[in-house]
Amino acid sequence: MIRGSFLYGDADTLEPMEVSALRLETASKNLPARIQVLDQADIEQSGAVDLVELLRREANLQVRSTSGNSARASVAMGGFGENGGLRTLVLLDGHRLNAIDMSAIDWYSIPLGLVESIEVIRGGQSGTFGNHAVGGVIKINTKLPNVEPSGSLEASAGSFDTFNARGSYSQRLGGIGLTIFGERAESDGYRVNGDLKTDAGGVRLDWASESDVKGYLSWSLSSSDFGLPGDLNASALASNRRQTTDPNDQGGERSAHARAGLSYDINDQWLLENRLGYQDREVRVNMPSVPFGGYLADTIYETFSYSPVLHYYSNAVVWFFGFDFSKDNLDSKTNYGDSKYERKTLAFFSSTGLPLSEQWNLNVNFRVERAENSGVYSGTKLNQVRKDEWAGGVGLIRDFGEENRIYGTVRRFYRYPATDEYMDFGTPAINQNLEPENGYEVEVGTDWSIDRIFLSGRIFRQWMEDEIIYDPLVGLFGSNVNLPKNRRMGLDFSIDWEMTDSIRSGVSYEYVKATFEEGNYPGSKVPLVPEGLLRLCIELRPVDSLWLTLGGSYVGESFRGSDFSNTAVKMEDYWLYDLGINYELSESATLFGGVENLLDEEYLSTAFGTGLYPGEGRKARFGLRYSF
């Protein structure tokens, strides 16, 4: 459900701490793009247990899961099917969470109790944000401390022996702001061997004194264990969709994130900001179901990043430029062999916002980046591959008051291949012929309010070259290849209507036509791209203390994964209905609950060939939230 302005969040962070939330990119409200802000009220009233559930319902994003839960789900936007998560950039306080390989993000490693707001920015945004930002960007902003001590505790339980507890506390100690957060989530899962258990927590320090130096330091840890129920064929699905044929396949993940930022006000017009990040992550997999001895893997990821940015502010122009440096190391040990990969990237970027008049604003951004890939596979040193790419955009924004605007923009975007995609099958070499994905996009959009109606929407056309797919028709065993040309055209919009003080309704819709234009599959539709995504919602507040929500999400039919020739049976469309309730016992305590998949719809979350992955059945949850 969309609430309030689409561009301006409702954060209540107090002024002394606000300046330490170093956001190095262009402010979202100044971007010529469709942006949806989910603030703290949206998060709490949604009743969502995790980020994936929140994004599916509140932002109408496409979600696919092979495990029957959200932990390692794929979240995509903009009409991307297989590996759509590789083309959606996820940022936590400006730090990239996407790995250099094709591994999934552990969404449970980001506790909802930590999150202050989420910005969903649609379209190719590589000029502003860099690699992966092809379909869009999900910016997750963590909580900042208030001047007065505050905190919250929340616990809930529900279907499939699901239990969730989270808490956070914030206090200012002199010039230092302290925030502590933690969360536990566990569930037996909808499917056999679909269990999950996650512990996550951390601490953040913010300092903002009367001096010109401000900053923050954050450290978080997470630990997850999960089952891997695998796919089912049609007969097994018809017999019992909750069963598994892989009861002993298990996985786990441990991660540690350190984030820091420091800003220095040089004078009234110049500001220097620095952002540093470090991530240490280990993913373990034990899959005895794999033929010929099973599959064992232990992969360690280590990432270091640094971004210095210089800002200039004046009445005539807002301008900044800076550098992004990152170094990623991957060390994988499996029962089939060991491998190590390293990727170094260095990017220069610049952006300017130029007011042409009181109503017209020009936004221009540019980025150039170099990526160097090297590694060792089973003792053999791999060839080094160096690739250069660039991105940019030019946009015009016409403002009509504080909230209304129209915009138009032209962008170029790119994405570097993941390390898995770079590897040639059967040979210890990095495929030097595999090029980064790139393309152009034209977009026109608006954000508009009329009385109690809020509208946000866009239409776009995307011309993409060198999109990477695994093509089984290439070579003896298939290979990752660049496609000559793909096209996407579509529209998406959201309407929020505050019908009365106690009734609010909303609708979100996305339509994308994604097709292969040339190569082995000309004219075919891109697999796993639904023909439409629709979200309907109505919220009722019969009394001040009670909030009821009824919603429905529609996912259109799509071709199964890897069905590039569009000859197999399609995945059927489906509706999922949900019901939510929030009842305020007092100013501090709230009872909440809800039911997902209210009618217990049987549907497929995703499918590849004859391998089918059923979605979750009806799921209920109830809990208590206490704030102080």
Image: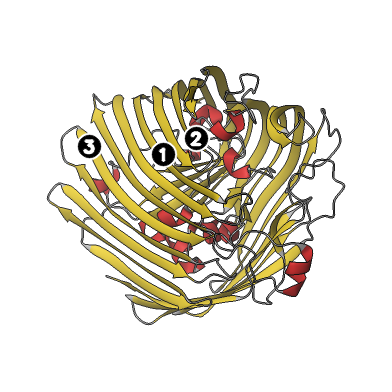
Q: Amino acid at mark 2?
A: Ile
Residue 71 x, y percent position in the rendering: 50, 57
Asked if residue 608 lies left or right of residue 49, the reply is: right
- Is residue 582 shown to the viewer in this render? no
Q: CA distance from mark 3 to mark 1?
A: 30 Å
Q: Are marks 3 and 1 in contact (CB under 8 Å)?
A: no
Helix, strand or loop at mark 1? strand
Q: Are marks 2 and 3 in contact (CB under 8 Å)?
A: no
Give the mark, 3 or 1, whose residue is nearer the N terminus. Answer: 3
Q: Are marks 1 and 2 in contact (CB under 8 Å)?
A: yes
Residue 566 x, y percent position in the rendering: 85, 45
In the rendered image, the residue lying farthest to the front is: 292
- Is residue 90 shown to the viewer in this render? yes
Residue assigned mark 3:
214
Q: Residue at x 44, y 68 (%)?
A: 186
Q: Assign the C terminus to one quadrant of the image.
A: bottom left
Q: Residues within 10 Å of mark 3 (few under 14, many from 20)?
A: many
Q: Closest to the observer: 453 or 373? A: 373
Helix, strand or loop at mark 3? strand
> Of circles 2 and 3, which is in front?
2
Residue assigned mark 2:
100
Q: Residues within 10 Å of mark 1 (few under 14, many from 20)?
A: many
Residue assigned mark 1:
301
Splitting the image into 4 quarters, where does residue 478 fall? top right
Q: CA distance from mark 2 to mark 3?
A: 31 Å
Q: CA distance from mark 1 to mark 2?
A: 9 Å
Helix, strand or loop at mark 2? loop
Residue 144 x, y percent position in the rendering: 30, 51
Q: Amino acid at mark 3?
A: Lys
Image colouring: secondary structure
Q: Amino acid at mark 1?
A: Tyr
